[in-house]
Amino acid sequence: MNATQPLLEITNLNIAFSSDKKLIPAVRDASLTVYPGQTVAIVGESGSGKSTTAHAIIDLLPDTGRVTSGQILFEGKDIVHAKKSDIIALRGSSIGLVPQDPMSNLNPVWKIGFQVKEALVANGVAKGKAATKRVAELLAEAGLPDAERRARQYPHEFSGGMRQRALIAIGLAARPKLLIADEPTSALDVTVQKQILDHLDTLTAELGVAVLLITHDLGLAAERADHLVVMYKGQVVESGPALEILQDPRHPYTKRLVASAPSLASQRLTSERAQVHKEAQQTAEEIAAEVAASAELGKGKKDIIVVKNLTKVFKLRGNRPGSSTDFVAVDDVSFKLKRGTTMAIVGESGSGKSTVARMVLALLGSTEGNVEFDGVDVSTLKGKEMLAFRRQVQPIFQDPFGSLDPMYSIFRTIEEPLRTHDIGTKKEREARVKELLDKVSMPSATMRRFPNELSGGQRQRVAIARALALNPEVVICDEAVSALDVLVQAQILKLLNDLQADLGLSYLFITHDLAVVRQIADDVLVMQDGKVVEAATVTEVFDSPREDYTKKLLNAIPGGRIELSK
Amino acid sequence: MTNNPPYPGQERYVRSLEESPLQEVDAVDTESPPTSIWGDAWKSLRRNPMFIVSAVLIAFIAVVVAFPGLFTSQDPTFCELSQSLEHGRSGHPFGFDKQGCDVYSRVVYGARASVAVGVLTTVFVVFIGGVIGAMAGFYGGWFDAIASRITDIFFAVPFVLAAIIVLQVIKNLSNGTQGFVQGVGSVVLALVLFGWPPIARIMRGAVLSVKNSEYVDAATAIGATRRRNLIRHVVPNAAAPVIVIATVSLGIYIVAEATLSYLGLGLPGSVMSWGNDISQAQSLIRGGRNVGVLFYPAGALGLTVLSFILLGEAVSEALDPKARKR
């Protein structure tokens, strides 16, 4: 490998977007270098300018964005000021791109084969019959079995992982020298992510292609790249050898990132508040223990939620009108949620974990089996009793952009549960909303704002405040932190943990991310294809997983094997 | 990961903290003024010249409808045959029609019937179509199946043709002695009867896309009833496309009234309306003596319809969900 001549050299790059006649800087003074055959990762949270930087390299900035100063040299030639035709010639043949979202980056009306062929023809690699043959080779190379038949299929017949493989085939079709992979696996399940990244690794190593990997996941970046570039608010705050940065982060932002990357963390969060709380209560508790013992028998059971043989069958429309086929989404699931603890349900997409959550919330009826809350079968509840159950069990949903009504102000959003249950006067409710906002560390000045003005993490805090409005016993978090940036995710997890300690909440925590489980849960339920594969405590699952599937999931946590010094 | 010394240009680099100050994680912006979706829509509307033009025109039309006396002192029903089809002169800028009535004052007073038909039809169409569409979309099941098929049936009947038949029936029943209220009422009835299906369809579609939102589930989980969900969460979020279509349709209903009156089936001849005046003027145009008799009511009609269509366009731009910031 000839390392003396950099393949890509970006120096003091500035990119700005124009909006309302103002120029808003998106990337400030960024520099980075990629050598042939090397993998370089840009790490940063959303809005850090990492994708903008990557898109500037192949001149794919949106119309409002432009490079205001600085240089991008590809093989020594300036491409910022190059002619349009030269850049078009460069795209595909010298610089390939694997875009972010496999679901929207393939044209649904053309067959996969046609779209790969397009890349070959556009770059003058092959034509006609030869191209068709090459398409099959490329798809096979990207790891798609039975490539010839696959090439004749349409994108909707492909799963997310298969589409991403097709996109990799397109990106590598013309054998570029540099492949820009923009969050290539963020939308995929962890095990699929690992497969695809492993494959991309070997493929690019074989072909000697340099990779510029854009990711938000520090663990993933460190595992895959030689050289790391950390971006924050449009600036490169730290760069250097991957391992060195991880073991000895120097910029405070990088330190923060390393400290809160869930894939690198190794133990359950403990709440400081909880410790103090416990100690203070110790003596009082001892005194009250005997008195309470008799009274408590009737008051609450140790297992607040007991799920027995829960099964959900969906009817799918069959081939003929009127006919239907059964799809078992949840198959004989049983578990117990202990009061004051967190039970995590882990699984990949389609494992039925969210369906379980919806049935526990009584948003969805079960086909068989039942959910007991505090000893009462939820499906038998009606009217007033149902309303009482609703007060006790509250959800926090995944999508912080979807779970708040955009027409409702923050105040109305948090007040709604109180109004629905006719609690308090207008004044009392307002005081309660302020108190709740304070609990989730939001200034009460945000009360009159609307969800569209808040970031994802802030919306999720509002959703938590709303869920807590009725003093529930159980909170069901359905992928509650999955859509958030790492630092914000860590913040929300800490908040949830503190609230659990303060209020004695029980959580049912639905997630696809085992790394998060380690931070928040006490017990784990691993689900696959609607069935429970393994049920154990967190320590058991992480230290001595029994089932192969659990091992596979653990193995797929990016950066899980990286040793952090200290 | 290798332990080779870094290549030139890839040495360890740390930006100084002064250059890239660390901000609080996920800090809350309490500085900028609060905005809402309707607030944002209003803001973008205010800067849209199309909206300003159409809003000024509509405001002007509204004043004409409410206080026609402000614009003319001529009695539109005071007609002298001796002035038949005379050209404009001082005090009578648009001249006279065949009966010798002042065209200008007829245009001013005719606005009332046309706008009344448009506004009333829109109100009823939105109400009926909105309720049927929202319930069909939200409750689904057998209600949706039946409501959707009925919508389809009404859709299949040509709008104007159906209105003609309905008006003919009403006319036969009332023996042709209708005043302003009955006249406008029967035209509105005919238009509403066959005008609601498009609104119902749009409402149903919008409700279908909104009802599966997580915030609806979230509201259910706090104990909100289905009806509360529909009224408080689903309908407000599904209203935007209906508002847009309703605004544009208002103009279309005014045109429909003119069409029906032109065919002699709309408002009775005794009610002053642009459609009736156009209808009466059509036979005169060949004579070419006062083209204004046809031109001015037609122009007023066109301007009114145009301003509602422009308004609809502007509102649609402002409410476009793609343009909304997330």
Image (tube, coloured by chain):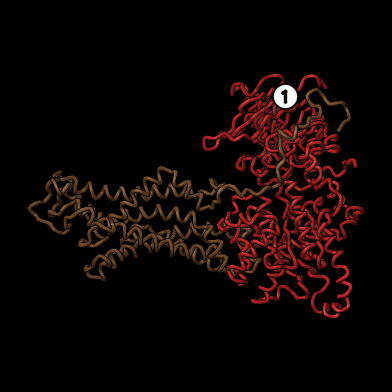
Q: Please tell me whether mark 1 sits on a helix, a strand or a loop.
A: strand
Q: Residue at x 48, y 54 (%)?
A: B241
Left or right side of A199 for B250:
left
Q: Residue at x 27, y 49 (%)?
A: B300
The quadrant of the image that shows the C terminus of chain A is top right
Residue B34 visible here:
yes
- Count residues near mark 1 (Cα–Cα under 10 Å), then give few for <14, some for 14-19, many for 20+: many
What residue is pinned by disc 1?
A9
Query: Is residue A197 shown left or right of residue A73?
Result: right
Residue type pointed to by label 1:
Glu
Task: Specify the quadrant of the image occupied by residue A272.
Answer: bottom right
Chain A: what color?
red
- Residue A9 coordinates in the image, percent (x, y): 72, 24
For residue B123, what is the image quadrant? Answer: bottom left
Q: Using the image, determine if residue A165 lies above or below residue B199.
A: above
Q: Position of residue B89 (x, y in %)?
A: 13, 45
Q: Is residue B297 above or below residue A73?
A: below
The quadrant where residue A68 appears: top right
Q: What colour has chain B?
A: brown
Please name the residue shown 71% across and 73% down the image.
A379
Residue B75, image x, y percentages: 16, 58
Q: Residue furthest right?
A: A544
Viewer-closest of B34 and A264:
B34
Residue A170 in view here: no
Q: In percent of the image, x 91 and y 55: which residue is there?
A: A546
Seen in the picture, residue A435 relative to A142 is either above or below; the reply is below
